[in-house]
Image (cartoon, rainbow, N blue to C red):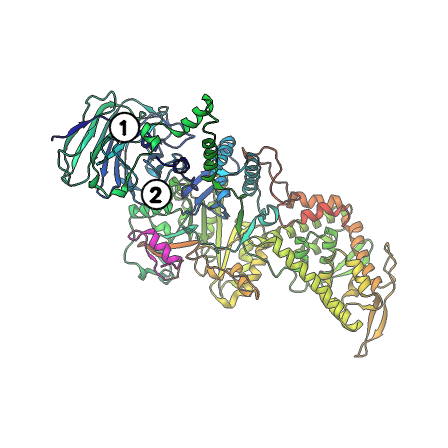
Amino acid sequence: MNKPDNFISKMFAPIKPLSPGIYHYQAPPDNPDNYRLHLRIEPDGNGLLVINASTVLHLNQTAAEYAYHIVNQTPEKEVISSVKRRYRTKREEVINDFTSFSKQIDLLIHTIDLEPVSYLEFERQAPYSRQTSAPYRLDCALTYRLPEGASQDAAPIKRVDRELSTEEWKSIIDRSWAAGIPHLIFTGGEPTLREDLVELIAYAESLGQVTGLLTNGIKLGDTKYLQAVLEAGLDHVMILLEPDHDASWDSLASFSYWKETLDDDIFVCVHLTITSNNHAAAFELVDKLAQAGVSAISLSTNDPALTSQLEEVREHVDEQDIELIWDIPVPYSNLNPVALELELDDDKEETFQGAGRAWLYVEPDGDVLPGQGINHLLGNFLNDQWESIWAKASGHD
Amino acid sequence: MNTKKKQRVLSIIFAFILLFSLAVPVLAQTYAFRLDRQTVHAYWESDGTLSLQYEFVFSNESYADPIDYVDVGMPNENFSSGLTYAEVNGTEIYHITRSAYVEHGIELGLGSMAIPPGQTGTVYFEIDGITDVLYFDSDDDGYASAVFSPTWFGSEYVNGSTDLTVIFHLPPGLSPDVPRWHKSPRGWPEEEPVSYFDDQGRIVYEWRNLNANGYTQYLFGASFPAESVPSNTIIKPTFWENIGIDPDDVFAGLCVTGFLSLFIAIPVISIRSSNKRKLKYLPPKLAMEGHGIKRGLTSIQAAILLEQPMEKIMTMVLFAVVKKGAAKVTKRDPLELEIIKPKPEGLRGYELDFLAGMKETAKAKRSKTLQAMMVQLVKSVTKSMKGFSQKETRRYYEKIIKKAWSQVEASDTPQVKSEMYEKVMEWTMLDDNYDDRTRRTFQDTPVFLPTWWGSYSPSPASRTSGPKPVSAPTSRPTPGGTRMPQLPGSDFAASVVTGVETFASSVVGNVNDFTSGVTKKTNPLPKPSKSSYSSGRSSGGGSSCACACACAGCACACAGGGR
């Protein structure tokens, strides 16, 4: 017979952190805040909480446990009892910490532009500095085809010899969700040239992923098509503005109309690339976008010599009722105002590239790159194991 | 096939069956379904591990929620979710993780393959490499006992009967007369399983009941020679397991029956062990991704961030437009400006808005326009701060203010001091003790007035006295021969302070009203929490006020209190 102490130790196996995986919560349609939470429990028990696919919070094990209960809407009594049962702590401590934690998350969800480091005493972490088990976002280039008349030089058509089928893309979406990637952006080429775009958006949404679309916007001028895209559940769209094309402006007008009818549940952003041709008129373009009701803009330049003009445009944007977005999968996106500002700092902190860490890019044939235009092959999403792709991206292979 | 029938007593396997778990679809939904068929293949491998293949046929009730997750209980915790495969209606699914709901279990997320209400779906799941699943047979140490209970579901979810089949595939290479089967569960149509060989030549025991149900735990077992598997993969039952008593029951029973004193050590060990197995609790900690310092703000933008009073910020804007040659003060009290035409290049948006506001002659309209200008300024600073740390940026600009003062104070001669002061004046103004410090710094020396000062402070003839006396400027020759106007340091400081006060009284009017008109737009109170977890306890957040932006609002809320 075993000694009682050994026996009891055996019977009471150690409690383990929560199972790794991704957990999702979407506020019900009648909730005016219309928010989504994605919690990824990492293998070490720590967590990553992504609010509305934009605010990224890193959680220690205890915070991850509380976030898990928030995402799963566990009744408070059960949370307290569960944490008390699983951790060496006192009931009062659990009550206080959970209440405080819930309020912090609640404030972050419901208060626009709250700065959590100052007002909620969060720690700050340099973007993309922490190794995680998967990126935050996957940019899926469904096709490198471009509309007729567009300069074919704008897409790296030669890189791929075939486009994946709908089922193959669905398989990639499944795998990305299983890997814990909460956010997909469909890009191209021109992704609206794929007949199955609406189906793929709906499919990713049905799993719980946040979806975005990067397009020239022209096909969205077709009201029927636009309605189908919106009904599929698309969360955000970025229109690559072609200032000289009336169709580009028409699509914006169309979007504004539907945005209102759909209770404001889609986020529209317009991307403007500052070039040597348009920089002189950039202020006017920004003003025109503001008048068109655009609420967010993304800026970059294709020419490093235009960085000071880019900064001026950024200041002009700050003075309008337009939000500035960066870190988006557009060409030259590394030349955005924030990245350039960080570059200029003499005593800057160590910065990390988001490509390969915070996001990956899938080409139309399934090949995975760290980011658009970074031609370092990490594997094929369809044929290679996710672990091997991510190990390569993380530099561990 | 000729195999020996073997009766087993429940006590032998009691501890083992406790390790099997209930399978449940995830909670908090209305689940109701029929489990039409459940087939389980249990492969007892020659390396001592167990592989399982499940096939469930669910018919979801028409009134229920979709079946979107299925949790499958595992015999113990010694399994890996990596050695798994699952599909729904023939389509592979990828959400296979350790279950959050079943202590030892696997969670299958059906995702888009969820079984809708009123429909039938087949879920297939397999897992390899489960270890620690064999025990020594209590009747014969030369035999390993393999007992297995297929996963079952909560009775509140399952309706109807189930065609349940459990198929044991024994380790390869056994002769038919060697292994022994255990008796079928009570109530099953046949006491013994059907025996045959599978396509790999392995001995198979198959139990089937067309009228089983999905919510009862059924036990199936077989024994085979221990040498069929590595000896270290077979677990020897403990004393407690052999006598078939759950130690938890022992402890509870001991307390109830008064044998506490005899076994006093056991509950103590139990509590200690219970704590030991728990996870270490650390206070919840959150870190947010963001950049550090936002450089490149103007002194006016920094003033917003540093929560300076609004009348001071507007005086700074006034200085800026005068300095840039866009306006000239024609009268200090009440303040009147002459807007210079054409406007110089390089005016910022808030400077243009300020000039537009000051053009208004009606006081109420002017105040309203300037309020709008301040709202816009706060919003633009908020926006430019997005993605950067306010805390670190504030600290950075506080350092700049300190540095500005030390540069002025370190200057050797009054003229160099004045030149330096002119360069950094807008930063020194951000110091809360600007007035005193200017007096101290220029205690015994005059301030050579900046070249633009004349446009701000008209000739003494048109200057009206403020609350503090202002000396008339005097002049002294510069090295080049021209004469630069100068003021005693204390008078200069007083002049700036007077300017702020004059601005407040003559342009803004009631500072508190003006301020609240701005803050209610820039810093609306956060919406009341909708969290179901709020219990009225104090928040762990560090916010001392309800600011939700670049926080001029904090300043303004405090401005009436004497900043």
Q: Quadrant of the N terminus of chain B?
A: top left
| Picture coordinates of residue A195, whole percent (x, y) | 32, 47
Which picture quadrant has residue B104? top left
> Residue B365 location, x and y as percent?
73, 47
B550 in the magenta segment:
no
Does the stretch in magenta take in A393? yes
Q: Position of residue B502 (x, y in %)?
A: 81, 53
Q: Nearer the viewer, residue B94 or B284?
A: B284
Q: Is residue B92 left or right of residue A308?
A: left
Q: Which residues are magenta?
A: A375-397
Residue under pointer 1: B219
Q: Is residue B433 left or right of residue B78?
A: right
Q: From the viewer's perspective, is the residue at label 1 or at label 2 nearer? A: 1
Say what amino acid the circle numbered 1 marks: Leu
Task: Estimate the x, y position of residue B141 in percent, counting from the top left.
Answer: 23, 35
Indicate the secondary structure of the residue bearing disc 1.
loop
Left or right: A97 in relation to A150: right
Q: Which residue is mark 2?
A: A199
Whether residue B42 is visible, yes or no, is: yes
Element at label 2:
helix
Q: Residues within 10 Å of mark 2 (few under 14, many from 20)?
A: some
